[in-house]
Amino acid sequence: MKRFRDTSIKTKLIMIIIIVTVMSSIIGFSGVLFYEYDNMRSDLESETGMSAALVGEFCVTPLSFLDESGAEEALDKLEIIPYIIAAYVYDEDGKLFSYYHKQDYLDISNHRIKIDPIREDTSYTNDDGFNFIKPIHYGDHYYGSLQLIASNDRLASGLINYFIMVIIVIIFIGLISIFPASSLQSVISNPVLSLANLTQRITNNKDYSVRAKKYANDEIGLLYEGFNNMLDQIERRDRHRDIVEMALRESEEFHRVLFETMIQGVIYFSPEGKVINANIAAEKLFNMSSAELKISKFDLSYWNVIYEDGTAFDNEEFPPWIAMNTAKKVENKIMGIFNYKDNDHHWVMVSAIPILNETGTDIRRIYTTFNDFTTRKKIEEEREILNKELIDKNTELEQIVYVTSHDLRSPLVNIQGFSNEILLSINELKSISNKMLLNKNDQETLSQILDVDIPESFSFIETSIHRMDALLKGLLKLSRYGRVNLKIENLDMNQLTKNVIKTMEYKIKGKNISIRKDHLPKCFGDEDQIIQVFSNIIGNAVKYMDKFDDGIINITSSSSDKYSVYHIQDNGIGIEKQFHDKVFELFHRLSPSESQGEGLGLTIVKKIVDRHNGKISLSSEIGKGSTFFVALPKHK
Amino acid sequence: MFIEKFTRFIDWPTGSNVTALNKPFIIGIYGETDIKDELVQIYGKQNILDKEVKVKNLGLKNINDCDLLIIAENKLADMPKITEFLKDSKVLTIGETADFAEEGAMIAYVLKDNKIRFIINQKQAVDCGFKISHLLLNLAEVINPVNQK
């Protein structure tokens, strides 16, 4: 069978056609043979039946008159029928009455001495041959039966002759069919063979641009079409593969370079915890080559790994091991890894991402990154120290401001008190001098001193005292706003600004300024301090308003994620751009001559806003007005 | 008993009692014979040609008063007379010895070793209008053969 499979399709087709032809001939002739045999058999049956009927009649009277010789005489007539080899006559009781044997054939056997009486035609075939038993009737009477045995030889020889003829005919048909088979097979084999040649060519030359030329529109035609389609697809796929390969190469190169040069350390772990690959940054971090890492057991204690508080890092907490057990991403675990080369701990943030296989059931590898932030950590630490120092200094400064302003006030009070005393004494001196008789010149000189010079000096002294007092009060206020604990609450800014405006109603009406106010969002802050912020800013707007009847102050708002921003806009004198930052500085006054105040208002505003983690800025143009933006936190 | 068997192979002439309905089949016996008792005994129970059987002893005067006549061995000498009497009647004549056939009995039989052998005078039978089956003729010894139509 294997040999048949390997023979050429040509031979196969020829063989198949011949086999089919021969087999159908065999089946056809078998049918005919069967039919013929059936005919021969029924001929034999009918001929035997006829002989039985004839001979049977001649046995009527011998049976009737028990004349065996008469029966024998009748049976002897069978001599002329060559295929009847034996005959037996039974009487009406089934007892053997007479018999006949052809020479060299059967002898009487025991079982034929008596049979069951047979009243209908009966036939069967046994080793002796074809048996036909006919009952013998005459008139209404039953006399017995006649059994004839026809030799099988007649059927057999007929069959054998026929069979030999059939075999000869079939062989002849088989031989004849070779010619049409070998010419017809080419209809199928030629296209297949040419396709096979084409595939061979494609295999040898790797040329997918050739195409098979279709012969017909049958299944082989379809095969050709399919083959050509396949070639199209292969060609397309080839081109696509080239593109993809190129992209893949580029991507690989990109990632390889990235992997090798990136600052982050990267290690791929197998699901068993073995290092699959490590980049240069990781090699440096662990002070081991990639090859060493691959064979290491990756025991953290080797690198003396610690938490931020300095205690030993729990091996179980190592992100890739967690990712391995949970199949979940672990991010930014901080650990200190001792580097033997630098002789110091390197601080890293470690993240691990489990990468699953295609089915998403098993972990294929664990991608682990080590983000070295040692430098940043050091800077942060330094900054923290500086910050602390700054805070200490600030506190100290505030303390100084407080103490100074507080302590300076008592000598000032003394100065004020004693200068009053001096004034009283001078008045007393004046009344005495009036009573004194002095020449006119002296009188005038004294009068000049007592009535003009001294009061003038005192007026300067008093002004200075008041001014100094105001400054000290301002400084105390400033230091208090920086010192007192904040009581943060959610503030209704509509109500708050309304109250602020009310306290300065007199001044606003005096300058006939119109105030417009939108609905304002809430924010978080200390009520007293925020009131201070708004009264200072609005107060400035009123104070520096140079227009009468046309003055406008707009209070609007905007909002961001974190802040509610309040815009306080006026159309007053405006501020020059160079002073925009300076307005928030201590004791800065833009026009000392034109307005009153100690120059602390916006400094206090900035301090309060800063303490609230808010922001303040301004935009302004000379002659057109200013807008202050106060951003205060939306959330606690 | 073979008497009945003969009747199976013989057609009685038309118009005889045998062809008429509802008439018994009458066996007549002329002379002394041993078989009478046997005949009476057997055919008292068994019909012949579907007819009831009667067995009678007949004399010469009424010798035609039957359908089948058995002539005893000792009456061989009367055969010419009997033949004469029965010339126009439709009676089958059976003689008890072989010689009867020559003397004009239609059938003569001989029993030997309990086997029957018989002689048929075909001409006699045919002349009287009887038709004898060739099967019976085939087994018998036939004298005066004629062509039956």
Image (cartoon, rainbow, N blue to C red):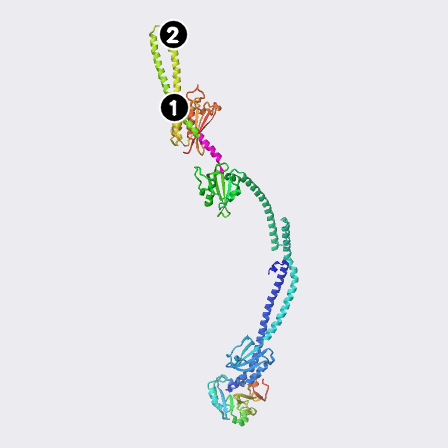
- Separation of marks 1 and 2 at Cα, in angstroms: 47 Å
Residue A594 lies in the magenta-colored region: no
Residue A544 locus on image (x, y percent): 44, 22
Q: Are marks 1 and 2 in contact (CB under 8 Å)?
A: no
Residue A339's place in the image compared with A122, above or below, is: above
Q: Residue furthest top?
A: A439
Which quadrant would the C terminus of chain A be assigned to in this image? top left
Q: Nearer the viewer, mark 1 or mark 2?
A: 1
Magenta stretch prevailing secondary structure: helix
Vertical side of A218 occupied by A634: above or below: above
Do we see residue A70 in this rendering?
Answer: yes
Q: Which residue is mark 2?
A: A444
> A635 or A473: nearer the eye?
A473
Say if the magenta span includes residue A372.
yes
The location of residue A320, given as percent across then percent down, is 47, 43
- Horizontally, residue A609 falls left or right of residue B15, namely left
Regarding mark 2 in the picture, which secondary structure is present there? helix
A502 above or below B54?
above
Residue stretch in magenta: A371-386
Q: Nearer the viewer, residue A179 or A290?
A: A290
Q: Nearer the viewer, residue A253 or A498?
A: A253
Q: Residue at x 34, y 10 (%)?
A: A429
What amino acid does circle 2 point to? Glu
The residue beneath circle 1 is A403
Residue A303 location (% of width, % of height): 48, 40
